[in-house]
Amino acid sequence: MADVQETSVDNISEEKVEDDPSKEALMYNEASVDSLSVTSTIPDVAPIGELDLEMSFEQRRSEGAITSDEVSKDPLGFLVKEVKAMDINSIVNTGIVLAVTIAVLSKLATVDAGLMRGWTAAEMAARIPVDNWNSYSAVLENSPVSTKAFTSATVYTIGDIIAQRTEGATIGELDRPRIVRSLLAGLIGHGPLSHIWYDKSETLFSDVLEWTEWWSVFPKVVLDQMTWGPFWNNVYIVMLGA
């Protein structure tokens, strides 16, 4: 009789569990949580030091990873770390830009080296730009073709670097052969050819047509845009190999 009662109690408990959907849902949720806790993994995270070495200076600066405290506490160590993080192209390009910049600034600043002994800072600031312009004008008058050639080479080189940087290239991604082609385009193309063109154009308007009034600038611009402009643009494209 007791065995029959125990069997009846077990059957009743099983029926209650089967009839109660909330208990079945609870058991299912517990099983799901257990499986998630077993299968979930933590992604590998690279150490901060490795991330610092992999990130370029410009990326870290744009993302706010470089702070003033990091530079001020150990500037030499910071510089060494940044150099190690740079690739060979970044080092070469940075070295070239720095060398040229220092040479140009040194030349501009020492134009009055033999005269400015005892000058004040205000006198230097007032005289150096004027004397550099006068020096350039004198060289231009004595050697017009070569001066215009070097001027165009400088402008085209700087312009190509700015263009590449605007396109999104970093200092290490600058295309040096392309920069050299732009330099040569200004040196052997735009500078000398511009000298010849504008010399002939001035002769045409002054001596042949005798258009020397103020309004003569308008036909000069029209002629320049219809002839010299398209001609040089095509020559420049060919010289760049585009």
Image: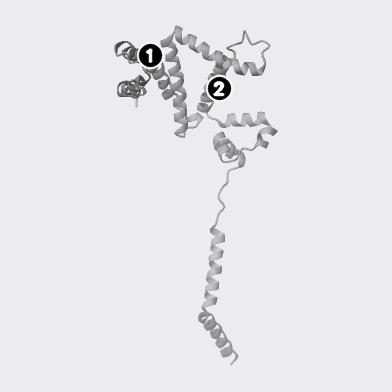
**SS type, badge 1:** helix
Q: Which callout, 2 or 1, points to the residue nearer the camera?
A: 1
Residue 41 percent across, percent down from the top left: 55, 54
Label 1 neighbourhood size at 10 Å, few (<14), some (14-19), many (20+)? some
Residue 224 percent across, percent down from the top left: 33, 21
Q: Considering depth in this image, is 52 or 208 the residue closer to the camera?
A: 208
Label 2 neighbourhood size at 10 Å, few (<14), some (14-19), many (20+)? few
Does the rendering let one see residue 207?
yes
**Measuring 56% from the left and 68% from the top, which residue is drawn there?**
30
Which residue is tagged 2? 98
Residue 1's place in the image compared with 171, above or below, is below
Quadrant location, the C terminus = top left
Specify the amino acid type for callout 2: Leu
Which residue is tagged 1? 195
| Mark with earlier residue (2, 1) | 2
Residue 141's place in the image compared with 21, above or below, is above
Locate residue 29: give its quadrant: bottom right
The reply to whether discs 2 and 1 touch (Cβ–Cβ < 8 Å) is no
Specify the amino acid type for callout 1: His
Residue 169's place in the image compared with 211, above or below, is below
**Measuring 41% from the left and 22% from the top, which residue is drawn there?**
182
Quadrant location, the N terminus = bottom right
**SS type, badge 2:** helix
Q: Considering depth in this image, is 128 or 46 the residue closer to the camera?
A: 128
